[in-house]
Image: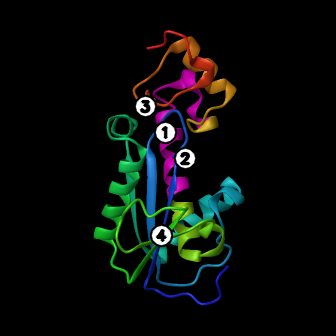
Amino acid sequence: MRENYHTNLCGIDEAGRGPFAGPLSVAGVVLKNDIKELDDSKKLSEKKREKLFDIIKENSFYHIVFTSAQQIDELGLSICLQNSIKEIMQNIEAQQYLMDGNTSFGIKNLDFLIKADASIKEVSAASILAKVSRDRYMCEIAKEYPQYSFEKHKGYGTAVHTDAIIKYGYCDIHRRTFKIKKLEGLNIS
């Protein structure tokens, strides 16, 4: 983690870029206080992420943007990411905006850094807010669609999820434009 921390940096990260179902979640965070134990959300246990979620919210300025599967299908993932980042920049004032990854999506004044979620506290915090928010949504929506087991795989492309799509077809929160190799040639609606 970075030793010096500045309240003028807004860290930005996303969760849900690759799943077959559910929203894209993008979070921006400016820390008001230093928080211990922050890391890339993928490296933390679910229990640890849940604990840090409330601590981050209490000790930061943050904004979380959800984009639906339908919007992703209609506009494409890159445009949805771009729109989410712009919304964060409009809602959080900072001197610098730093996105985890390898592109600025053509947005002026947006810096990017690969693996920033593991090395920059503000981006780690954004990573946790984005992931926990999305995971909670997927667990909640699983009650409406129990046959897909969203609470277990969160919409990602597991064998259980793919088999459920084959058996039950798509539901309202599936991304129909995503190409799934196992489903190619099948007539699924």
| Quadrant location, the C terminus | top left
Instruction: Describe the element under mark 3 as helix, strand or loop.
Output: loop
Instruction: Describe the element under mark 4 as helix, strand or loop.
Output: helix
Which amino acid is tagged 1?
A: Glu
Label disc, if present, on residue 57 of the rendered structure: 4
Label disc, if present, on residue 135 of the rendered structure: 2
Q: How far apart are marks 4 and 1 (CA)?
A: 20 Å
Answer yes or no: is residue 45 visible.
yes
Which amino acid is tagged 2?
A: Asp
Q: Which marked residue is nearer to the observer: mark 3 or mark 4? A: 3
Label disc, if present, on residue 140 of the rendered structure: 1
Which is nearer the N-term, disc 3 or disc 1? Answer: 1
Q: Which marked residue is nearer to the observer: mark 2 or mark 3? A: 3
Residue visible at 44% across and 64% down? 104
Q: Which marked residue is nearer to the observer: mark 3 or mark 1? A: 3
Instruction: Describe the element under mark 2 as helix, strand or loop.
Output: helix
Q: How far apart are marks 3 and 1 (CA)?
A: 13 Å
Question: Is residue 89 rendered to the left or right of residue 169?
Answer: left
Q: Distance between the residues labelled 2 and 4?
A: 16 Å
Colour style of the rendered protein structure: rainbow
Q: Residue 39's spot in the image, x, y percent? A: 66, 68
Which is nearer the N-term, disc 2 or disc 3? Answer: 2
Instruction: Describe the element under mark 1 as helix, strand or loop.
Output: helix
| Quadrant location, the N terminus | bottom right
Label disc, if present, on residue 153 of the rendered structure: none
